Image: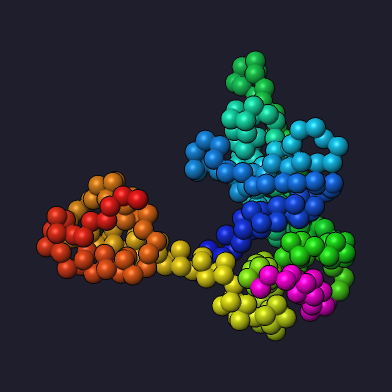
Amino acid sequence: MIWVICRCATPKWLIQHYGDALLRLAGVRDVVSWRPLQAELVQPAQLPDGLLEVHLLGEPEPDLFVIEIATYPEDRLTEQLYRDALLAQLNRRIVAEVVAFILHPKGTKPTPSGITLTSRRGWTELAARWRIVELWKLPAEELLATNEPGVMPWVPLAHSTDPPPEVLRKCRAVIDTVSAEDERWNLLAVTQVLARLRYNDSQLFAILGGRRTMIESPLLQELEAEWKAEATAKAIVRVLEDRFGRISPVLREAIQSIRDESRLDRLLTSAVRCGDLSGFEAPPRS
């Protein structure tokens, strides 16, 4: 379970911390400055993986880039990208640059780079296009040549004629130039997580620090703590509902908002031992 969470969360961490490096994979150059925006376009279920405001050299206004990252080509990605384009226009009043990064091939069906929808009578037509970046088609040598630490986590997924150990050693050499220790551990950890999509060799991962990296990375420690908190909160809700029936949405939300592990442990004990809901140590809403 921890591995699944890490696999899902680490690309989003890269968007937030190294968005300019990700844009480089899509062919965007001359980035003067950039910042991640809160990706709240309309509904949580419709949020894109990332939203970047980017100032490019010579451009008077910033560009908005909507980012989606998919592990494999999937039919639902087309629907998500179409929705991203529409929501960005409706909420930001601009046509955003929508780009999807696909990390690993699966099957032979290509991911469409656009879609056109027509009404039943043919009076109305809606169309959208976007950029698709397939990581396995990018040349690893060009990515390595950037010497940008934020690019290195993506290199193991790119195409290379060099043997995998050599590729990972080159990635490690660039990441090791990062002076901040926590950031260095995080980059090694996300590189290892992404490399696991392609390889299953503990000796390869040892080049990136192996198990020690996964332990030392503050990012993965935070993700593990969040997962444990979410799991304990779900257990509390399940115990209460098994014993007393469905609880109120207010109480459920209050429990699920808690992240303090010791407090959650006390609440779980209370959920098991209390005589009724009124005797449960009800948490205040945060």
Residue at the image point whose x is 85% and y is 46% from the top? 30
Q: Is residue 201 visible?
A: no
Name the magenta segment's main secondary structure. helix
Q: Which residues are magenta?
A: 163-181
The image shows residue 199, relative to residue 110, as above or below, that is below
- Along the viewing direction, whichever of 242 and 107 lies nearer the viewer: 242
Q: Between 52 and 121, which is closer to the camera in this rendering?
A: 52
Where in the figure is residue 123, as x and y percent of width and height? 65, 15
Let me know if residue 171 is in the magenta part. yes
- Judged left or right of residue 141, residue 240 is left
Relative side of 137 to 224, left or right = right
Residue 36 lies, in percent from the top left, at 64, 47
Toward the viewer: 10 or 135? 10
Q: Position of residue 147 (x, y in %)?
A: 83, 65
Give me the residue at 31% from left, 66% from top.
263
Q: Is residue 6 visible?
A: yes
Is residue 40 rendered magenta in the image? no
Q: Residue at x 82, y 35 (%)?
A: 59
Residue extending farthest front: 179
